């Protein structure tokens, strides 16, 4: 599974607290990413969501569940 084209085309990501990232596919529909560490920033990087953690690590989410630490 990967991000839907609707998520990618809408292109909005919002931090919701310190450990939750919302990836929107419409103005009212979104997918939650619950992160186990504090998040500093999140943004799109191509067709992946790039999450910058407070501890300096960076994760690249290829879908709502799977990520690689960069």
Image (tube, rainbow, N blue to C red):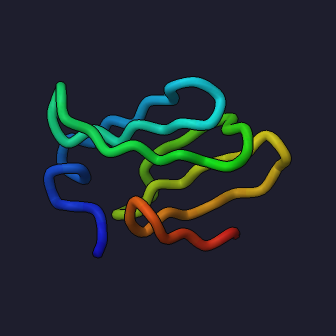
Q: Is residue 26 left or right of residue 34?
A: left
| Quarter occupied by residue 63 | bottom left
Residue 3 pos. (x, y %): 28, 62
Residue 38 pos. (x, y %): 72, 38
What residue is rendered at 55% in x and 69% in y? 67
Question: Compared with residue 17, is residue 69 higher up or lower down, i.e. above or below?
Answer: below
| Quarter occupied by residue 13 | top left
Picture quarter with the C terminus: bottom right
What residue is rendered at 54% in x and 42% in y? 42
> For this rendering, which residue is in front, 63 or 12?
63
Q: How many marks?
A: 0
Picture quarter with the N terminus: bottom left
Q: Is residue 61 left or right of residue 7?
A: right
Residue farthest along the right direction in this orientation: 55
What residue is rendered at 53% in x and 36% in y? 20
Residue 26 pos. (x, y %): 15, 35
Question: Compared with residue 62, is residue 31 higher up or lower down, i.e. above or below?
Answer: above
Q: Is residue 5 left or right of residue 46?
A: left
Question: Compared with residue 31, is residue 15 higher up or lower down, i.e. above or below?
Answer: above
What residue is rendered at 19% in x and 35% in y? 29
């Amino acid at each position: 599974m990967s991000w839907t084209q609707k998520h990618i085309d809408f292109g909005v990501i919002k931090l919701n607290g310190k450990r939750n990232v919302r990836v929107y596919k419409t103005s009212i529909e979104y997918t939650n990413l619950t992160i186990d560490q504090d998040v500093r920033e999140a943004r799109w990087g191509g067709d992946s969501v790039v999450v910058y953690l407070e501890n300096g690590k960076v994760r690249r989410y290829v879908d709502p569940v799977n990520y690689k630490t960069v």
